[in-house]
């Protein structure tokens, strides 16, 4: 009987450790990790903004995450930035103005597809957000993706780079942001 009680407590201990690990994982991925990533982006935005005569502001409870406001003469008075967090080995397909599909998982070997995909619904509000003519909407892909492509029609696709205006916004990888900000 004692042996049965000991085995039962060991099983509960393993179960308890498993549940605790799952809770910690959820807290890390939904709470702590995004805050760390946004802080890293903000530091980079501060540096880039200072070099280009802008002021970087972190937006609170808005459709966008960051705003760069011009302190002088520049092409854009304000740059509204929405950060989207994607796996590095992935591709993004823009189906329409507010419908983006993320393909991820697997490897980046030629001829191999990505086993997982999901729609980036968290971008819908920002993609439909209206800005003035002298303002820019910018989607910042953190940390980066292998390819961003856009459907032109039902059978044609083009590769999008940071210079292209897609509908009424631009897209850039986080890795390219600091070196190509002036090209936006």
Image (cartoon, helix red, strand yellow):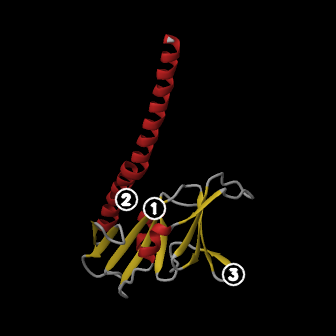
Against 6, residue 170 (above or below) is: below
Q: Which residue was labeled with disc 1?
A: 174
Res 136 visible: yes
Res 52 visible: no
Q: Report how far apart the C-alphas of labels 2 and 1 lie in the structure.
A: 8 Å
| Residue that sits furthest to the right in the current view | 111
Residue drawn at (71%, 80%), measured in percent from left and top? 155
Q: Earlier in the sequence, mark 1 or mark 3?
A: 3
Q: Which residue was labeled with disc 3?
A: 154
Discs 2, 1 touching: Cβ within 8 Å? yes
Q: Which residue was labeled with disc 2?
A: 41
Between residue 4 and residue 32, name the one nearer to us: 4
Q: Residues within 10 Å of mark 1 (few under 14, many from 20)?
A: many
What numbered label is drawn on residue 36?
A: none
Q: Earlier in the sequence, mark 2 or mark 1?
A: 2
Against 24, residue 58 (above or below) is: below
Q: Based on the displayed image, in which of its 4 quarters is residue 87 positioned?
A: bottom right
Mark 1 or 3, closer to the camera: 3
**Residue 12: image x %, image y %?**
47, 27
For the C terminus, the image quarter is bottom left
């Amino acid at each position: 009987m004692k042996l049965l009680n000991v085995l039962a407590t060991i099983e509960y201990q393993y179960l308890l450790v498993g549940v605790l690990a799952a809770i910690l994982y959820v807290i890390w991925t939904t709470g702590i990790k995004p805050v760390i990533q946004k802080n890293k982006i903000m530091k980079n935005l501060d540096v880039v903004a200072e070099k280009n005569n802008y002021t970087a502001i972190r937006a609170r409870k808005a459709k966008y995450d960051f705003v760069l406001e011009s302190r002088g003469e520049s092409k854009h008075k304000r740059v509204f930035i929405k950060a989207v967090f994607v796996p590095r080995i992935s591709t993004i397909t823009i189906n329409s103005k507010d419908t983006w599909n993320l393909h991820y998982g697997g490897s980046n070997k030629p001829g191999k597809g990505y086993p997982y995909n999901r729609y980036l619904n968290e971008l819908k509000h920002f993609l439909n957000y209206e800005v003035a003519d002298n303002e820019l909407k910018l989607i910042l892909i953190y940390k980066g993706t292998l390819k961003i492509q856009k459907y032109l029609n039902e059978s044609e696709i083009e590769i999008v780079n940071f210079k292209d205006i897609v509908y009424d916004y631009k897209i850039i990888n986080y890795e390219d942001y600091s070196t190509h900000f002036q090209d936006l």
